[in-house]
């Protein structure tokens, strides 16, 4: 028994020992951060036990120790045996909830059991962070004061979507006339409250952003409304609302927010700092900025004296003192050139990188194999940059199975706190790989991996230019280093689904041509052009290398098919249901030659897009056809079209017409202004005269007038080539004026309009009075008259010969001052000011109030001096530094100025900020004539931004010819022989490039120019005349004679239509000559890589190897049937001239009073002509009863009847009235009257 007790005691003792021994479970002591986290952050996990062996500590690992949902790409590092750090490779998603689960990989080979929780965190949800209120002007109305609120969001928003979610109050009352000033998506949106009445007391304003408002990034909106209030002091008081500060490279800055804009010129008298420094001031809106060299100073005492004036009369009431702490800059690392993608093979092969507050950089270089390039580009096509509001971050490219990682290196940076450090990454070590391809280069902070940037780079000496037309592709290959053609290079066209479509070798001139492209690549779309020569390889992506042409005049008449020109026309373009439609078509090819033996199909398309009817048509001997079809009585009203197709279903032309229940206009309205030139404060009289189309005055009719004032540039006929409207003035926004009244018995009136005072304009203001006169049935006819308003009595013109100049040389400008009559002003006293712009690295704040470096254009005054302008005056400028300049000329004592921008550059005079990143210049193309005929020779002058090699092509729809020119002294000349193929116009295009080197004499790597040349045979315009009487009576037959060239079988069509019908749609007489010889669009797309060339960077630091409103007026028609109004509309069909070139048609005029327009179209081969004439048709006595279109049961009415005598003799008239159906006459049925 004793031994049993002894055994039990031992067991209990052992259990106690085990229970008191060390635990076998590992827990998490801390996981941080959790809850709301910033988009850029590391995560640190502290474990209760040591887990990581020594050989895995203090190195970045790809092994996944924590599973994040959604997945977060990144790497892990054990900074100690029990501390795990996770660093994301890229920023966290905005407004995103995450969870984190620690997996068993953290245990390694230990015997611990995990006891881990799941952790959650989220990036900031969408919110409004603050609102700043301050006094300002109403946009475009500088003479009116308002309040502006800058609303700060933590993510970018679309200003267009904000208005419906805003509620603005002043002293508790709703403000409804506010304007959203901001136009672009941003995280700060400016709101103007409209005109605010001034008081001597402070005013309470509030801004409410309602719940559910969503950021432009999408996801969840505001959870609840956010309201911000502020009491603004009266306009007579200036208050300081906020002060921030920071470093800007080696210097510092302080920004002070105020309740109204301050006077920049007075700041130096009121602001000082301790320690005392030389201060530079600038003002933007309600923020004044102070910049100075602070050295290593961490705090500054800012002093602002009372009396500091605001621009709107406010005065700072008391001295302001505050100790300002200088903030630290957010660490960052970025490639200096964000856009460039091509490095020259055999050059420096360096990439420049900028870093701030980063001690060690990890560099990784990878290769994407050439057959995987398209997959790679598609995979990373979603990167967008939100540089405007600094939300977006740098891309992070992952090659994976599309290539391989070549090497990784580390760079230690020696830099001061908050200093911007530049260094280079050399890629020589990446060359010489077994397989061809492109490279990705990534740079990231060793400690915080999300602080990174990545870049795609091709390293090659093969420069690629391409011209892509509908059925041609030209590829020009030149050496990037020498600018010489590369022969024998293999060129491949790769489709959007990565198939090789076409292959060819460049000829001795470095050109590969692909023809019959449509047939050879049917069903595929080109995406890449790949060029290989020996071991060299390069490519261009057609989605990112397109030469943008919106700044050039390359548009023209829309062509449905490049090889067809189809002129469709008819007697009018508006019909009623049940009418017959008449049309004719003239078909020519792209050389304006007759098209024969091509079967065509004409489809009538209804307003709903359905095919109403389809006709097969054959072309006649002159390549034309005519078409007639009848609309059913029940036809749907709306816009119809006649679409013409070839037999292989290609659309080659379209004609639109309307079907409406309309009544022809009966009156004509003429509107004119008594002054063509006026000034603010003047009174302008608008003369209105209305008459019936048959000639009688439209007596006592009502009218409405809408008077609009719009800005336009001032141009001088006496001084062509001078620019007069490139002004610093902000155009005043002017509201429309609406007036109404009644015409006098002669159908006339004078409308008086007072032009507002205080209008400002960059040029002049054009006033347009739109006058609508109501006829006897209440329908309107609208016409307009214009007049010019001159807000100032002088205009300064600047004429320059070029955009690009050298330094230390005479830059010649011509100046002139003219009055509103375009007459020169003698002895005009002016001030000239030269401003230089530099791109400087400045410190900015992002949506999370973090500071970062960015590039910003700043201006520096070079000099200012008084001058006198007498007639055209030469003015010379000499600059000693490369850069962008602005010459400003202003009237002495005035603040507004005329300006012109130019560039100057030369070796050794450029600074780091002399030029913006954009490397594309403009080639100006000038012809010696405005118009040419085939067979002539044209002289072409090219003015270029730099000297080099110029590829000149002649294009339109395809490439006709090409040649290279050597450009010396930045200009070149060329003579071209013109042929019939170039009619009606051809485009001369220019691509300028040069040897790529470290030479920085020009900031541009490429120049582009496009200019249309008009080529027309003048004798292709047929003379056409119409012989007809000027005035006839109804119910007669008239012979109308059409005369053209004395030639038989010229095809002619004749139409006679009531002017009241044509006036409804402002129908113009068909003009086939204008159509066939109208300017055609370019229809060739240009591509090249030169704008994306990376500059040659010398190694910086050691780095690892490697208006016409009148035409827009729309008339509305009545849907009630109007068959009682018979239409006058005649169509002759196609006729042929006799041997003397005449055609005679017989025209039956029915019972009709009005004006008939005669329209004739003539054509033969490549010759075309047209003409119009008008005939007045009127009875001696005309009755115009005012009868409504419909009546309701038990209605009664009084019907006025107008009697119009068109003769010069008085007459006594008996008027009788009859009714049918359930109508009853309640007055006498006859009346006598004189007319």
Image (cartoon, rainbow, N blue to C red):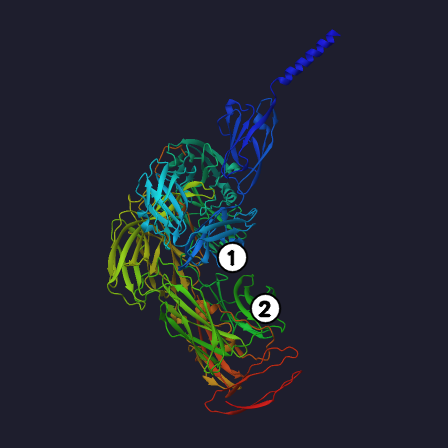
Q: Position of residue 807 (x, y in %)?
A: 27, 49
Q: Nearer the viewer, residue 545 or 1180?
A: 1180
Q: Residue at coordinates 62% horizontally, 81% vertically from top-left?
A: 1196
| Residue projecting furthest to the top | 2
Are there few (<14), some (14-19), or many (20+) residues within 10 Å of tag 2? few
Q: Residue at coordinates 56% horizontally, 68% vertically from top-left?
A: 639
Q: Nearer the viewer, residue 386 or 962?
A: 386
Q: Which mark is residue 615?
A: 2
| Residue projecting furthest to the right | 1
Q: Are marks 1 and 2 in contact (CB under 8 Å)?
A: no
Q: Position of residue 431 (x, y in %)?
A: 42, 36
| Residue projecting furthest to the bottom | 1212
Compared to residue 1166, the image places residue 831 above or below, namely: above
Are there few (<14), some (14-19), or many (20+) residues within 10 Å of tag 1? few
Tell me if I can see residue 983 in this picture: no
Q: Position of residue 805 (x, y in %)?
A: 29, 51
Q: Tag 2 or tag 1, which sits nearer the N-term?
A: 1
Compared to residue 549, the image places residue 564 above or below, namely: below
Dot 1 falls on a residue whose secondary structure is: strand
In the rendered structure, the answer to whether residue 1033 lies left or right of residue 786 reads right
Tell me if I can see residue 557 in this picture: yes
Q: Position of residue 925 (x, y in %)?
A: 35, 58
In the rendered structure, the answer to whether residue 997 lies left or right of residue 443 reads left
Per the image, the residue denoted by label 1 is 174
Q: CA distance from mark 1 to mark 2?
A: 62 Å
Dot 2 falls on a residue whose secondary structure is: strand
Question: Comparing marks 1 and 2, which lies closer to the viewer?
Answer: 1
| Quarter of the image that includes the N terminus | top right
Q: Which mark is residue 240?
A: none
Q: Nearer the viewer, residue 1130 or 495?
A: 1130
């Amino acid at each position: 028994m004793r031994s049993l007790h002894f055994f039990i005691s031992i067991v209990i003792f052992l259990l106690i020992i085990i229970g008191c021994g060390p635990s076998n479970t590992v827990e998490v002591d801390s996981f941080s951060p959790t809850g709301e986290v910033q988009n850029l952050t590391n995560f640190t996990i502290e474990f209760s036990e040591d887990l990581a062996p020594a050989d895995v500590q203090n190195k970045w690992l790809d092994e996944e120790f924590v599973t994040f949902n959604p997945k977060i790409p990144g790497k892990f590092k054990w900074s100690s045996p029990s501390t795990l750090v996770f660093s994301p490779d890229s920023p966290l998603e905005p407004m995103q909830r995450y969870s984190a689960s620690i997996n068993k990989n953290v245990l390694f080979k230990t015997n611990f059991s995990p006891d881990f929780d799941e952790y959650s965190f989220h990036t900031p949800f969408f919110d409004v962070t603050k609102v700043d209120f301050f006094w300002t002007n109403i946009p475009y109305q500088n003479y009116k004061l308002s309040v502006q609120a800058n609303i700060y969001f933590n993510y970018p928003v679309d200003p267009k979507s904000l208005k419906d979610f805003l509620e603005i109050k002043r002293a508790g009352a709703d403000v409804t006339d506010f304007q959203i000033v901001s136009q672009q998506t941003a995280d700060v949106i400016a709101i103007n409250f409209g005109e605010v009445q001034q008081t001597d007391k402070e005013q309470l304003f509030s801004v409410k952003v309602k719940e559910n408002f969503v950021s432009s990034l999408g996801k969840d909106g505001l959870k609840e409304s956010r309201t911000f209030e502020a009491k603004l002091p009266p306009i007579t008081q200036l208050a300081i609302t906020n002060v921030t500060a920071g470093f800007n490279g080696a210097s510092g800055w302080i920004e002070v927010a105020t309740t109204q804009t301050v006077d920049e010129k007075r700041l130096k008298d009121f602001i000082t700092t301790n320690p005392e420094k030389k201060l530079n001031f600038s003002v933007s809106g309600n923020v004044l900025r102070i910049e100075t060299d602070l050295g290593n100073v961490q705090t500054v005492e800012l002093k602002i004296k009372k009396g500091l004036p605001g621009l709107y009369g406010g005065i700072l009431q008391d001295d302001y003192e505050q100790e300002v702490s200088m903030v630290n800059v957010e660490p960052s690392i970025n490639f200096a050139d964000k856009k460039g993608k091509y490095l020259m093979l055999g050059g420096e092969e360096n990439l420049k990188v900028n870093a701030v507050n980063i001690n060690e950089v990890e560099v990784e270089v990878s290769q994407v194999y050439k057959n995987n390039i398209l997959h790679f580009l598609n995979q990373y096509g979603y990167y967008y940059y939100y540089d405007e509001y600094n939300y977006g971050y740098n891309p992070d490219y992952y090659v994976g199975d599309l290539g391989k990682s070549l090497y990784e290196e580390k760079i230690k940076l020696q830099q001061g706190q908050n200093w911007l450090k530049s260094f280079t990454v050399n890629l020589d070590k990446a060359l010489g790989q077994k397989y061809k391809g492109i490279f990705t280069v990534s740079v990231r902070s060793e400690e915080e991996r999300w602080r990174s940037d990545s870049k795609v780079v091709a390293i090659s000496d093969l420069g690629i230019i391409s011209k892509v037309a509908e059925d041609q592709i030209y590829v020009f290959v030149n050496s990037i280093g020498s600018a010489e053609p590369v022969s024998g290079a293999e060129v491949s066209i790769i489709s959007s689904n990565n198939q090789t479509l076409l292959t060819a070798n460049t000829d001795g001139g470095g050109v590969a041509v692909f023809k019959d492209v449509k047939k050879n690549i049917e069903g595929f779309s080109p995406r890449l052009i790949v060029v290989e020569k020996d071991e060299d390889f390069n490519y261009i992506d057609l989605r990112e290398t397109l030469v943008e042409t919106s700044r050039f005049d390359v548009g023209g008449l829309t062509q449905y098919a490049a090889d067809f020109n189809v002129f469709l026309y008819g007697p009018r373009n508006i019909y009623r249901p049940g009418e017959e439609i008449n049309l004719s078509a003239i078909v020519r090819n792209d050389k304006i030659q007759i098209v024969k033996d091509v079967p065509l199909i004409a489809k009538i398309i209804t307003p709903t897009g359905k095919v109403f009817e389809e006709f097969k048509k054959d072309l006649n001997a002159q390549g034309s056809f005519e078409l007639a079809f009848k609309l059913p009585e029940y036809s749907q009203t709306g816009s119809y079209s006649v679409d013409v197709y070839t037999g292989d279903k290609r659309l080659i032309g379209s004609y639109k017409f309307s079907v409406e229940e309309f009544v022809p206009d009966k009156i004509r309205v003429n509107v004119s202004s008594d002054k063509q030139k006026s000034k603010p404060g003047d009174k302008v009289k608008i003369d209105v005269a209305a008459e019936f189309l048959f000639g009688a005055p439209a007596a006592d009719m009502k009218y409405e007038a809408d008077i609009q004032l719009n800005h336009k540039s001032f141009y001088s006929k006496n001084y062509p080539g001078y620019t007069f409207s490139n002004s610093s003035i902000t155009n005043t926004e002017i509201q429309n004026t609406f007036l109404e009244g009644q015409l006098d018995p002669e159908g006339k009136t004078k409308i008086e309009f007072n032009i507002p005072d205080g209008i400002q304009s960059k040029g002049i203001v054009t006033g347009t009075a739109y006058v609508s006169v109501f006829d006897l049935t209440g329908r309107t006819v609208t016409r307009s008259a214009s007049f010019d308003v001159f807000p100032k009595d002088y205009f300064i013109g600047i004429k320059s010969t070029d955009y690009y100049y050298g330094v230390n040389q005479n830059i010649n400008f011509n100046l002139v001052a003219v009055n509103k009559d375009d007459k020169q002003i003698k002895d005009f006293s002016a001030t000239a000011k030269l401003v230089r712009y530099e791109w400087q690295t400045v410190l900015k704040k992002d949506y999370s109030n973090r500071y970062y470096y960015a590039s910003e254009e700043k201006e520096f005054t070079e000099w200012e001096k008084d001058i006198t302008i007498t007639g055209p005056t030469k003015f010379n400028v000499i600059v000693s530094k490369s850069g962008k300049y602005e010459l400003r000329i202003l009237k002495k004592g005035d603040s507004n100025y005329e300006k012109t921008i130019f560039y100057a550059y030369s070796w050794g005079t450029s600074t780091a900020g002399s030029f913006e990143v954009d490397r594309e210049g403009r080639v100006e193309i000038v012809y010696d004539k405005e118009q040419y005929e085939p067979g002539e020779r044209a002289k072409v002058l090219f003015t270029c931004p730099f000297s080099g090699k110029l590829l000149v092509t002649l294009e339109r729809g395809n490439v006709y010819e090409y040649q290279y020119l050597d450009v010396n002294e930045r200009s070149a000349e060329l003579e071209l022989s013109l042929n019939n193929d170039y009619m009606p116009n051809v485009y001369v295009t220019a691509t300028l490039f040069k040897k790529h080197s470290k030479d920085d004499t020009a900031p541009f790597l490429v120049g582009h120019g496009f200019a249309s040349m008009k080529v027309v045979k003048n004798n292709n315009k047929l003379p056409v005349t119409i012989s007809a009487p000027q005035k006839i009576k109804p119910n007669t037959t008239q012979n109308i004679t059409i005369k053209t060239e004395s030639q038989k079988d010229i095809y002619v069509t004749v139409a006679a239509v009531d002017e009241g019908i044509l006036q409804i749609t402002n129908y113009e007489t068909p003009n086939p000559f204008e159509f066939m010889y109208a300017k055609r669009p370019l229809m060739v797309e240009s591509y090249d890589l030169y704008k994306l060339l990376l500059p040659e960077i010398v190694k910086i630091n050691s780095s690892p190897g490697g208006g016409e409103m009148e035409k827009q007026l729309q008339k509305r028609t009545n849907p009630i049937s109007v068959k009682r109004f018979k239409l006058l509309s005649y169509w002759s069909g196609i006729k042929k001239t006799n041997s003397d070139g005449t055609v005679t048609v017989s025209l039956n005029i029915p019972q009709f009073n009005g004006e008939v327009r005669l329209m004739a179209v003539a054509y033969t081969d490549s010759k075309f002509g047209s003409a119009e004439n008008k005939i007045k048709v009127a009875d001696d006595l005309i009755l115009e009863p005012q009868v409504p279109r419909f009546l309701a049961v038990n209605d009664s009415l009084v019907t006025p009847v107008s009697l119009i005598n068109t003769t010069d003799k008085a007459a006594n008239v008996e008027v009788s009235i009859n009714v049918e159906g359930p109508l009853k006459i309640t007055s006498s049925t006859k009346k006598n009257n004189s007319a």
